[in-house]
Image (spheres, rainbow, N blue to C red):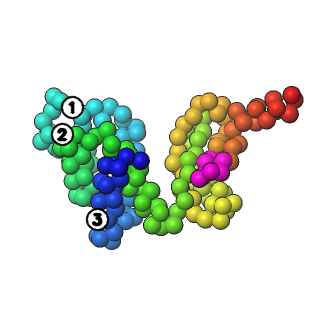
Amino acid sequence: MNEIASKYATALYELALENNQLDLYQEQTRFVLNSFEENEEFFDVLNSKFLSIKEIHEIIEKTYVGVEQDIISLLKIIVENHRVSLLKDILVSFNSLCNSYKGITEGMLFSAFPLDKKTISDIELAIGRKEGRKISLIFKIDPSLIGGVKVVINNHIYDGSVKNKLAEMKQSLS
């Protein structure tokens, strides 16, 4: 993790704790992060050399109506300091700090296809029961899996992907 991104994330985390709004800030930063992942071109807008800082600030405010002012201010500061390239790292790091505070272990969930929130939640619960702790999974699409899912938590891998099953079959036939 980038040290600068970590400092921004820590500052927002401390504000969230100070304001007793950790859950709200975490929910809203996830919303912001998801909006960037759904629309990669938005990074280009925030990095635009053709728009003034004031215009970019206005776009942020119009895009994130209802989001806490501390989060809006963070986005504006990131734009002003030309650190938009660190934005995803900042938000992911903030989420990790929140989860650590709550005693939640983070992991990665990979699937060849999009999964709905209920399916992801069911997988988190099932893995959580196996691990004996609360789990939060970050979802990523990996077409190379062909089908099924793969979960990585710390150094433990739960691999139910078609790709893995084929590899196991190949090895047993050899």
Q: Are marks 2 and 1 in contact (CB under 8 Å)?
A: yes
Q: Could you tell which of marks 2 and 1 lies nearer the N-terminus? A: 1
Kindly identify which numbered label has been placed on residue 15: 3
Lower position in the chain sequence, tag 1 or tag 3: 3
Residue density around tag 2, few if under 14, some if 14–19, many if 20 or more, within 10 Å:
some
Asked if residue 172 is positioned above or below residue 136 in the image, the reply reads: above
Q: Name the residue: 64% across, 33% down.
A: 145
**Is residue 49 something that shows in the picture?**
yes
Question: Answer yes or no: do the residues labelled 1 and 3 have beta carbons within 8 Å?
Answer: no
Q: Closer to the camera, 164 or 36?
A: 164
Q: On residue 48, which mark appears? A: 1
Between the C-alphas of marks 2 and 1, the distance is 8 Å
Disc 3 residue type (three-letter): Leu
Where does label 2 land, which residue? 56
The disc at residue 80 is none
Determine the residue positioned at 36% across, 34% down: 40
Q: Is residue 133 magenta?
A: no
Q: CA distance from mark 3 to mark 2?
A: 24 Å
Q: Position of residue 34 (x, y in %)?
A: 40, 45
